[in-house]
Image (cartoon, rainbow, N blue to C red):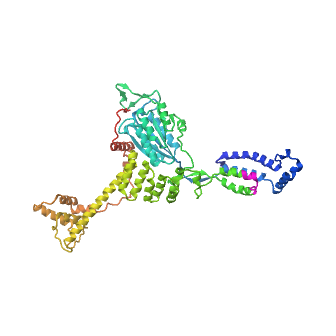
Amino acid sequence: MADFHFLRPFWLLLLLAVPVLYLVLKRKNSGDSGWSGLIPEQFLSPVIRRYGGAADKRGSALVPAISAVIILAVALAGPAWREAPTPLKKPGDSLVIVLDLSLSMLATDIEPDRLTRAKRKIRDILAIRDGSLTGLVVYSGDAHVVAPLTDDSNTLTGMLNVLDPIIMPVQGNRADLAVARARALLEHGAQGKGRILLITDDVSERYRASISNTLAGTGFTLNTLAAGTRDGGPIPLARRGFIRDNGNIVITRTDPDMLAELARSSGGASHEMTLDDSDIAALNLSPEESDEWQDTNSGLAIDRWKDDGYWLLWLALPLLLLGWRRSAFTAMALLLLPAIPQPAAALDWGGLWQREDQRAAELISEDPGTAANMLESPEWRGSALYRAERYDEAVEAFSGADTPLAHYNRGNALARAGKLEEALEAYDKAIDRNPEMEDAHVNRQLVENLLEQQEQNSEQDQNSSDQNSSDSNEGEGQQQEPNSGSPGDSQNQDQNTPHSSDEEPGQAPSSDQSREQNAEQKESGEHEPASEKESNQASGGAEAGKEEAQAPPPISETPLTQSQEQSLRRVPDNPGGLLQRKFLQQYQERQTPSDEGDTPW
């Protein structure tokens, strides 16, 4: 019992009601209702005293009532003295960290520099939010996603070391593009409340209105963390001194007041970066523990204290039955029962206490078909129907909403239903309303490729049917010479007829025979079509064709030797180079226009 403690000790305050309950019941059992001062004793005795005598015969409710209060207070306090494995869970809030990777973050007005301090602060945030959904976006002249929303904080921590302005394809301060990327991550993968944390030293006035418009009506809040000081500092570059503008050293300053105003415009808060965790506490960046937590699929578990207070309810039950007919005890029970947590029952008990958006995800994961009948929101109902593979009904449900996400999901349902052309139209509507929705661009390209593939297959089937009909018109069972027919027919037969080492008369010529015939034609000066030449060149010699037809050798499961392992260890690990190439490719694909009014630092 050395580990005995209470999980919810504040419920022990209920014991303060014991003296009050004692006085109330004592006064009630005394029979003095206040009428004795107004009515003579001889007239009051037949009524009041008779009730008191009856009460004495039934027994007093004082003992069971006080005992029940004490037992219920201890049970609700959660007595615990043992641990049990519990599946890991993740909170229902999501956070996207937006980090400024412009050259101004290299200023040394704080030690060692702004960027290093910012990365240390991100590590502290990830340690506090371990197990919760967190994403990371970086920006300079363009914005890039380092990691989407994930509960693996180790992955994010490992990527921090390589974040540097030199990996960015273009320099600048496009915070508006970064906030748009963060919003897209939250819209597609956020669970519960979505928040954005912007870590920077300044945001140009030309981008503030765009940031406010991006977050307007989304419900996502923007918090800002100011890196740097008001006095500012120079920006050093390795082996190049300080950044200069027209010969003058550039001094970049932090404007915490402006960042605070930007955060307030979206319902968030702002704070200057500190050495301790006071800024994290002020911005409330820790995960919010609530009833909206959902199980993860990691299969991991953690030991948690087990609440054994429910065993005490068996002791309170006979006391409840004993004092049920006492009016004071019944009133006390009615006051305590609503305070006891009630589990969600099958008769939609949770619908009395939670909004639809709070419980929809859990209902869909448990039973999509049943959830579709319970949910009323077009988007949630469409998601349930989509999970239940009722795609036509999901399309109809998503049609009831006119949001980018609804059009995107309607396109997915149409694609699943085989209506590819209509799916392209739905994706186009989603992209028109939100051009930053990358998933819509990707899925639209996939559906477009699938349409092109279907058209090519249909053309090939048509050509094949025409070829078969032309062959049947020439007569069945006729024997063809190797060089008979048009070159196109000979080529089609070589491609579509399986080759055999033991050929019967009347079969299509083998690859060896075709090669010999082509050589004879070449020696005799005959000109063969270019398409046939390419086919013969591609086929190569018989030996080469056999080698290509052979299956690849099986993968060796022999463990590596010590020298091989040492050679692998000498291969440089350069995740920064991978990110740099990834960001460059994204920048080239997007063709983000440069802002002439932006500064390169």
In the rendered image, residue 429, in percent from the top left (x then y), is placed at 38, 49
Which of the image's four quarters has the C terminus?
top left
In the rendered image, residue 420, in percent from the top left (x then y), is placed at 36, 56
In the rendered image, residue 577, in percent from the top left (x then y), is placed at 36, 42
Residue furthest to the right in view is 42
Nearer to the camera, 10 or 357: 357
In the picture, measured across the screen, residue 146 lies left or right of residue 351, that is left
Residue 114, by quadrant, is: top left
Q: Can you say whether 371 is above or below 208 in the image?
A: below
Nearer to the camera, 66 or 412: 412
In the picture, measured across the screen, residue 39 lies left or right of residue 88, that is right
Q: Can you say whether 497 is above or below 581 in the image?
A: below
Residue furthest to the top in view is 248
Nearer to the camera, 326 or 515: 326
Looking at the rendering, the stretch of residues picked out in magenta corresponds to: 322-331
Look at 35% across and 25% down and name the residue there. Answer: 247
Total numbered circles: 0
The answer to whether residue 290 is seen in the rendering is yes
Residue 87 on the magenta segment: no
Q: Is the magenta stretch mostly helix, strand or loop?
A: helix
Residue 326 on the magenta segment: yes
